[in-house]
Amino acid sequence: MDTKTATIENKFTSYQALVIVLLALTQFTVVLDFMVMSPLGDMLMKSMELTTSQFGFAVSGYAISAGFSGLLTAGFADRFDRKKLLLFFYIGFIAGTLLCGLSTTYFLLLAARIITGIFGGVIGSISMAILADLFPLHQRGRAMGFIQMGFGASQVLGIQINLYIENNFSWQSPFLMIVRLATIIWLTVGFKLQPVIKHLELKTEKKAIIHLWHTITQRKYWTGFLMTALLSLGGFMMMPWGSAFAVNNLGVSNEQLPLLFMASGLAALVIMPLIGKLSDKIDKVKIFTAAAIWMMAIVVIYTNLSPIPFPLIMMMNILMMIGIMSRIVPAMALVSALPKMQDRGAFMSINSSLQQFAGGIAAAVGGMIVVQKTKTSPLQHYDTLGYVIVVIIIFNIFQMFRVSNLLKAQKLTDKL
């Protein structure tokens, strides 16, 4: 294949570009709904007089309910048009977010977060199944990079707007803003996205529960499941306390907080497409390993920081974001190659569920490790979280090599 032919094959079609935009927008709102809990964390704990454990359970409630939802829907994920599944769960996510915006007590908020997780936690796996169906592996890294830009955009645009609204109105207002935006996106997806039904041509006589069991019992699939679960553990364990640590330990003011998140988000927006492009050209394991080693060093330094000048805090957050994003893109692109097309929806749902379960457990455990004696006192034992995360990342590197070796063996077998 000459260079010109390879370039043409690597180029996205206009419809593929449209799909990337639509999936990125849905990811933007879902990630924003989850991510907003971190910058609102310090304010929310103070306004509702929550303990770190209570706030940790509010975060983990979303993740654990999302995990159960993913398992319950996994058996059906490959039996329907993926577009219809996306629209169904997205409208449920909108309803759950609306309930968050209407909450006035901790228990109402907790219930609303659980409902939002039931629907919102499945959207990512459906999006990844759509992406894997419509994009070949040699395009998947770049497509994944662009779609995951929703993570960075949620920090650059969404969190800044949400913090502004929260500071000038109430903490519930950001959720209501997400509802308005998500409603527009839901209508656009309904009109613009074509049915995604190619997997339905691969007929299977398995009933939903049998199909779920068949997917769960595939030994090679568990290699990918464990990979993404480990990937989730570190982020969920550290992320909920980001704003509280910045404000109470590092001396960041509430006025500086939006700028801190914006800087991290901009870094994610820049790095995601670059890493996506590199992961399609260079070995994904090498990129992941380099990013993981980078991440371990930054985490240890950051979690042991005392008050330092704000520009240095911004720089540390940017370096940490680069490490986080540079692991996610190659890891998810590689894992998406494990399942067969007729198992892809179930695989992605189970994968997302286990990732959410791991994240929910990590957030709850993080809330038990981190201690804050008063509303304004520094967080204690945050450095302990850093050391735990380093151990998790080491296991993550080992598992990434296992996934890569499994795919190489699978490719060799297919050739024979």
Image: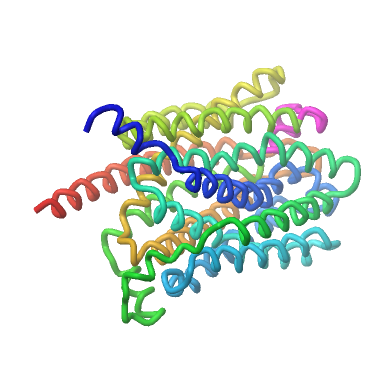
> Which quadrant holds residue 329?
top left
Q: Quadrant of the N terminus?
A: top left
Does 254 lie within the magenta span?
yes
Q: Nearer the viewer, residue 284 or 300?
A: 284
> Which quadrant holds residue 348?
bottom left
Q: Is residue 124 above or below residue 40?
A: below
In magenta, the rendered stretch is 242-256
Q: Is residue 8 above or below residue 75?
A: above
Q: Position of residue 244 (x, y in %)?
A: 72, 39
Does 274 lie within the magenta span?
no
Residue located at (61% from left, 52% from top): 26
Residue lying furthest left: 416
Residue located at (84% from left, 44% from top): 166
* Colouring scheme, one of rainbow, by chain, secondary structure, one colour: rainbow
Determine whether, in the image, residue 38 is placed left or right of residue 319: right
Q: Is residue 317 above or below residue 60?
A: above
Q: Nearer the viewer, residue 31 or 368?
A: 31
Q: Nearer the viewer, residue 223 or 210?
A: 210
Residue located at (77% from left, 62% from top): 98
Determine whether, in the image, residue 30 is placed left or right of residue 227: right
Q: Position of residue 6 (x, y in %)?
A: 30, 33
Determine whether, in the image, residue 362 is placed left or right of residue 141: right
